[in-house]
Amino acid sequence: MPETTQSPEATTTDSAPTIPSELLLQIQRSLAGIDYGSVEIVIHDSRVVQIERNRKTRFRHPLEIPSL
């Protein structure tokens, strides 16, 4: 199940969006410690409403599951 973090809204100006430092920090925290996976930023009405983090674990050698 994805981990979800509520995030502050981004604001915009006429020239370029201004990204709050708190939002950038949340994105950095979401990326920390992920070797495989994804970080999804969810936007509604031009505002960041949540960050979803999916972390995957990969095995170098597939694990065998015994028959039941």
Image (cartoon, rainbow, N blue to C red):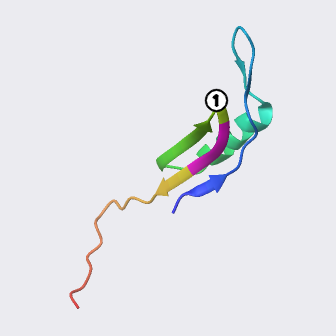
Where residue 12 appears, as percent x and y from the top left, is 73, 20
Rendering quarter of residue 26? top right
Residue lying farthest to the left in this orientation:
67
* Depth check, front residue: 30 or 14: 14
Instruction: Give yes or no for residue 66 being in the magenta stretch.
Output: no
Vertical relation: 40 (above or below) 53 = above
Residue named by callout 1: 46
The residue under the point 56% across, 51% down is 53
**Residue pictured at 61% horizontal, 37% vertical:** 44
Q: Position of residue 52 (x, y in %)?
A: 57, 50
Residue 17, image x, y percentages: 70, 19
Q: Main secondary structure of the magenta part?
A: strand
On screen, 68 above or below 61?
below
Residue 42, located in which quarter of the rendered image?
top right
Q: How many marks?
A: 1
Q: Could you say whether the residue bearing mark 1 is in a helix, strand or loop?
A: loop
Q: Is residue 14 left or right of residue 33?
A: right
User: Which amino acid does the dot numbered 1 rest on?
Assistant: Ser
Q: Nearer the viewer, residue 12 or 58?
A: 12
Specify the farthest residue to the bottom: 68
Residue furthest to the top: 15
Q: Residue at x 60, y 37 (%)?
A: 43
Check disc 1: other Cα within 10 Å, few if <14, some if 14-19, many if 20+: few
Q: Which residues are magenta?
A: 48-52
Of the 4 image quadrants, the one containing the C terminus is: bottom left
**In the rendered image, the vertical position of residue 39 relative to residue 61, given as above or below:** above
Rendered location of residue 27, percent (x, y): 66, 40
